[in-house]
């Protein structure tokens, strides 16, 4: 069993990893709350934007390149929402989520075609060059941003939904779309705002993830799966719980890296660490399922 | 529209299948004849036409049609989406391989055992599903798929080694189960797989026409109504899951004996997403949809590769297909193509009858 | 006119070099130097010695396009998110194109059918059948796959194909029907471990490879080597891409302990984020870092900062990419002309060499070009000399396993380039590997001693 000293660096790194999960998880829940759509293409949009930034770097000013990723995220998400939002608006969340799989596959195909995986692609954000040393581990500013960003998004969204008119309209929309429309709230415009906002958050995630995790197409696109685990623990509703869940998953997964002497079968526990989000999500779901009645119409 | 976990699905991934119009009773013998003819062609007419490369491709298609069938039943009849069908096929392959090294049971028994064990595991995954609605069920199957994939990658497929997991480093990179004695050649094995697939389709058809099918239809229409009508929703939902998992497990067992064997890398979680796309495109109303899905998943990529078209195009096409099916053609190709053909047939008929009238 | 000018320049270059200083082949079994008489490329008989080619020419060097009946050659390469080996078949294709532009094989062009696979055993088995039975290729050259050797070895034995490959899994090096122009991760990681040991690694030697079928066997080489040299060997299997490269870096350092060595076994695109994390965490000096050959690629050197100068010992299965020697320059030319999208890299070297030896063998066939004569020609290749290899290459050792490339050197990144730091050295013979046997066979049969 590793001691606290062995675990300390992994605790710190786990926060950084958790930031990645929390970032995507919170982005997912924000959109789900406003439109009922669980955007499974979230990771794909972020990755495509990051690759666009990578392609532009060296040719244009780096801030323009990164801004392109954010703009792309906002534009694609908004476009999807405008075109495919209304037709699916009255349908079950499962149908809406399945539809986003269509967008996921389209983007995946485009990415693999335009940026074939054979070459090394990386970029280094200027924030990576500065770091702090904590517990024998260096944490750079990109990682710190990766931790702060989801917190800011969570707090900001909470405030926005409560305080602003558009936010209140979004909450009403989430509750009951028909009645909200009947009350004269410009439903489509509010939804468009939700899509755009989610897309911009997605784009910013893309910029950060390109530096934190790299530009591996399939890997970053399907980073959405552990992020979904965090979102599930938050019951697709609570941003704060999703945020916390993301960080907890990251810390636990990272700490398991230190368990190299404990074995399951022939392999050390450390080799199984990527199972953490799934196990935690399944446990959480089982827990939630037990306390509720079977049917509610 | 709500974010609560436990809302009963107000509609389903695809709307309920339409009631078959009267007049199909007369068309039945014709349809049976067509199906019989197709089966005869597959078993006897096709193998001599194919070279060994295409033989292996269509064998893969026959096997995956069972996986697609299970998923199609879940989506089309019960309204549940599962994202772990492909991983369950891997589990089936694992079970079949482990048993084949540990015992000397005959091949069909191994495949059946693979099916039953996988069905049990699928039921376990489906248990929490009882209390959760559509989206959450899909997500929990995704979580289960992710977890099982990681475990499989750590323990690998059995290759003759010792211990529970039966894998040893010296055993080689891919694991293969010996084929049954009456299906040693590639062509014979293809026929064997087709026969098993037909059995699975018959199993599915039996379910659909009898009590389970009616119970599923009631559940999909409205779970509350079904319960008040006395339908044991818990049982039938679990049954559906077990059936789909059984089919995936049997498919996995057959895969374990395919040329080249199996390796854990060929069952990534991403394939479950692609499978969902092709099953939707193939059509979830009718059992034929599974055949179309298998074609899209295994035969079309091989054709495109032959013609020099890149497979990324296919991924994009599948994405467009998903959106199209969900928006406008919920029955998928299996539903749309016969309808279009029928429409075409009627138009042609009208042209002729007008000519006759004019003459 | 231009071609003859180039030929004159090349020949003069050879003459000058021959008279000049040969400061990079001091060791006994380094690449043959240019003291051989300058040649132009009349088709040498299969199995003969020096095959230095004049620049701008391939194969027959006629400068005319071949128009006869095509000679079909097949191959397959992995193209999946974990590994993309299509540069190798791409480079072989480029070489064959150059051959076709220069008269082909007796006026017949080579039709190269290169398939891609996604690590699916059934797909790989079916592609082999497609090449052999449907396309009816006369030979297979340049295949590179994570698992093909394991899946197809029996099939190729049945069909009597002798396949020239770039090998990955150990099955590629334990079967008489495959012979690799490269060394493969087992031997290459071993070479990395040897370099790390020479650089002062002590206590523990860690080896990390992808969690792909067959790689635990590959790690075993380094573990055995460590134990032979009184270190503790630690084997780690971790799939790229790394979700948390900084965490993995910390784990590697912890496992290596003080002054320990770490041998990495990943491709360029996968290893760079890890190396960047190691640098970022300040761990470059916390262990002796070494690697098998795939990161030997200028784009990797460019992606690494000066903190990595001389600190990443990459086992280069071939000579350095900017050696300035004739074959290397020839490869660079062909790459620029026919396949500019392929990076100058050891993968490109593999593809080039596969194309070279195959073409040479094909040109040496007397009589009809059939499946039997082609595979017999491939099988009889001996003493093929190239400045890209440390020692001459041959196909068959006769002991049931072929590891012809078993001597190589080490390169390190320095200021954005890969630079050689060690002379050619022999990969370690261990009780667990077959190198002792193979070297004995090489000596007994004169397979690579330079005698025709």
Image (cartoon, coloured by chain):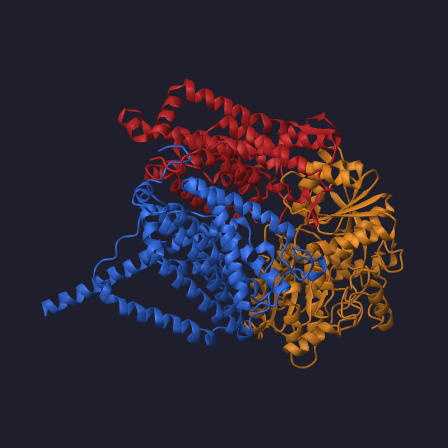
Chain colours: A red, B blue, C orange
Picture coordinates of residue C429, whole percent (x, y)? 84, 59
- A194 to C342, vertically: above or below: above
Residue A62 visible in this rendered orientation of the protein: no
Q: Is residue B187 left or right of residue B32?
A: right
Picture coordinates of residue B166, whole percent (x, y)? 66, 58
Residue C344 visible in this rendered orientation of the protein: yes
Quadrant of the snapshot with the C terminus of chain C:
bottom right
The residue furthest front is B230
Quadrant of the snapshot with the N terminus of chain C:
bottom right
Q: Is residue C114 left or right of residue A297?
A: right
Between B264 and C207, the residue placed more toward the observer is B264
Between C54 and B177, the residue placed more toward the observer is B177
Residue shown at 46% from the left, 33% from the top: A291
- C233 to C109, vertically: above or below: above
Between C262 and A273, the residue placed more toward the observer is A273
Picture coordinates of residue C310, whole percent (x, y)? 80, 41
Picture coordinates of residue C133, whole percent (x, y)? 56, 73
């Amino acid at each position: 069993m590793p001691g606290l000293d062995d675990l300390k660096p992994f605790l710190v790194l786990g926060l950084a990893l958790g930031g990645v999960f929390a970032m995507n998880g919170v982005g997912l829940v924000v959109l789900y709350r406003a439109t009922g759509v669980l955007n499974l293409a979230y990771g794909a949009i972020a990755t495509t934007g990051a690759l666009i930034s990578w392609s532009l770097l060296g040719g244009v000013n780096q801030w323009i390149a990164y801004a392109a990723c954010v703009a792309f995220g906002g534009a694609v998400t908004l476009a999807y929402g405008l075109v495919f939002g209304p037709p699916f608006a009255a349908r079950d969340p499962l149908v809406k989520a399945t539809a986003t799989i269509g967008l996921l596959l389209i983007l995946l195909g485009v990415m693999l075609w335009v940026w074939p995986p054979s070459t090394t692609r990386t970029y280094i954000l200027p924030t990576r060059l500065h770091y702090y040393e904590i517990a024998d581990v260096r944490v750079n500013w990109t990682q710190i941003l990766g931790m702060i960003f989801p917190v800011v998004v969570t707090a900001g969204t909470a405030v926005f939904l409560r305080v602003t008119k558009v936010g209140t309209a979004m909450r009403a929309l989430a509750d009951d779309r028909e009645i909200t429309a009947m009350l004269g709230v410009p439903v489509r415009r509010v939804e468009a705002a939700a899509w755009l906002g989610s897309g911009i958050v997605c784009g910013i995630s893309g910029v950060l993830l390109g530096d934190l995790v790299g530009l591996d197409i399939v890997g970053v696109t399907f980073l959405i799966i552990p992020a979904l685990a965090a979102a599930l623990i938050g019951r697709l509703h609570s941003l704060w719980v999703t945020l916390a869940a993301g960080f907890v998953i990251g810390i636990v997964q990272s700490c398991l890296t230190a368990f190299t002497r404990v074995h399951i079968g022939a392999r050390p526990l450390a080799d199984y660490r990527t199972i953490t989000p799934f196990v935690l999500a399944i446990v959480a779901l089982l827990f939630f399922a037990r306390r509720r009645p079977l049917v509610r119409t | 529209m709500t974010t609560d976990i436990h809302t009963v699905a107000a509609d389903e991934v695809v709307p309920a299948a339409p009631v078959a119009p009267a007049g199909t009773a007369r068309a039945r013998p014709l349809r049976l004849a067509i199906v019989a003819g197709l089966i005869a062609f597959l078993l006897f007419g096709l193998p001599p036409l194919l070279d060994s490369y295409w033989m292996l491709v269509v064998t893969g298609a026959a096997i995956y049609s069972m996986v697609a069938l299970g998923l199609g039943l879940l989506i089309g009849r019960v309204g549940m989406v599962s994202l772990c069908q492909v991983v369950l096929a891997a589990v089936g392959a694992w079970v079949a391989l482990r048993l084949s090294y540990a015992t000397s049971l005959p091949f069909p028994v191994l495949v059946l055992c693979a099916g039953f064990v996988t069905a049990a595991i699928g039921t376990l995954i489906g248990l929490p599903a009882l209390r959760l609605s559509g989206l959450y069920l899909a997500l929990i199957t995704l979580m289960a798929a992710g977890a099982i994939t990681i475990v499989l990658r750590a323990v690998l497929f059995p290759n003759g080694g010792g211990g529970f997991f039966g894998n040893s480093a010296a055993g080689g990179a891919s694991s293969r189960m010996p084929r049954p004695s009456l299906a040693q050649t590639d062509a014979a094995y293809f026929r064997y797989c087709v026969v098993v697939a037909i059995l699975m389709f018959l199993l599915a058809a039996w379910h659909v026409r009898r009590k389970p099918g009616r119970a599923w239809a009631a559940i999909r229409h409205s779970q509350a109504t079904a319960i008040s009508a006395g339908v044991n929703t818990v049982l039938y939902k679990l049954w559906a899951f077990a059936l789909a998992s059984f089919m995936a497990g049997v498919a996995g067992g057959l895969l374990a004996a395919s040329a080249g064997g199996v390796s854990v890398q060929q069952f990534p979680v991403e394939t479950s997403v692609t499978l969902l796309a092709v099953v939707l495109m193939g059509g979830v109303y009718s059992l034929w949809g599974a055949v179309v899905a298998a074609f899209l998943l295994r035969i079309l990529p091989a054709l495109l590769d032959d013609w020099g078209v890149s497979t990324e195009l296919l991924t994009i096409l599948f994405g467009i297909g998903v959106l199209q099916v969900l928006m406008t053609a919920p029955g998928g190709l299996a539903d749309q193509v016969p309808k279009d053909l029928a429409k075409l047939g009627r138009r042609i008929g009208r042209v002729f009858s007008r000519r006759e009238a004019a003459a | 006119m231009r071609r003859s000018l180039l030929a004159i320049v090349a020949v003069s270059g050879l003459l000058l070099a021959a008279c000049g200083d040969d400061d990079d082949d001091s060791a006994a079994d380094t690449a043959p130097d240019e003291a051989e008489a300058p040649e132009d490329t009349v088709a040498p008989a299969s199995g003969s010695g020096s095959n230095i080619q004049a620049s701008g020419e391939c194969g027959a060097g006629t400068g005319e396009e071949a128009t006869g009946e095509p000679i079909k050659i097949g191959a397959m390469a992995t193209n999946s998110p974990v590994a993309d080996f299509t540069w190798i078949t791409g480079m072989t294709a480029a070489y064959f194109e150059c051959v076709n532009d220069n008269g082909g094989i007796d006026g017949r062009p080579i039709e190269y059918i290169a398939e891609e696979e996604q690590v699916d055993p059934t797909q790989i088995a079916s592609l082999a059948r497609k090449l052999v039975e449907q396309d009816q290729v006369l030979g297979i050259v340049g295949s590179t796959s994570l698992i093909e050797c394991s899946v197809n070895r029996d099939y190729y034995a049945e069909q009597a194909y002798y396949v020239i490959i770039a090998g990955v899994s150990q099955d590629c090096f334990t079967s008489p029907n495959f012979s690799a122009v490269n060394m493969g991760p087992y031997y290459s990681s071993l070479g990395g471990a040897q370099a790390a040991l020479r650089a002062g690694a002590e206590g523990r030697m860690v080896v990390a490879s992808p969690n792909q079928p067959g790689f635990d066997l590959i790690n075993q080489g380094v573990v055995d080597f460590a134990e032979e040299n009184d270190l503790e060997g630690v084997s780690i299997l971790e799939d790229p891409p790394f979700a948390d490269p900084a965490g993995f870096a910390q784990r590697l350092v912890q496992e290596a302990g003080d002054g320990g060595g770490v041998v990495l076994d990943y491709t360029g695109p996968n290893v760079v984020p890890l190396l960047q994390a190691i640098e970022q965490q300040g761990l470059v000096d916390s262990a002796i870092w070494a690697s098998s050959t795939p990161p030997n690629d200028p784009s990797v050197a460019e992606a690494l900062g000066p903190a990595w100068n001389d600190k990443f010992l990459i086992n280069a299965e071939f000579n350095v990419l900017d050696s300035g020697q004739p074959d290397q320059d020839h490869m660079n030319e062909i790459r620029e002309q026919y396949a500019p999208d392929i990076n100058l890299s050891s993968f490109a070297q593999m593809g080039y060499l596969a194309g070279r030896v195959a073409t040479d063998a094909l040109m040496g066939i007397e009589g009809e070009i059939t499946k039997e004569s082609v595979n017999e020609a491939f099988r009889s290749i001996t003493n093929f000399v190239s400045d890209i290899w440390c020692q001459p290459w041959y196909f068959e050792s006769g002991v049931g396993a072929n590891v012809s490339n078993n001597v190589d050197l080490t390169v390190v990144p320095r200021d954005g380039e890969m630079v050689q730091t060690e002379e050619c050295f022999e990969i370690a013979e261990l009780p667990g590997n077959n190198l002792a046997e193979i070297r004995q066979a090489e000596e007994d049969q004169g397979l690579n001693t330079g005698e025709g």
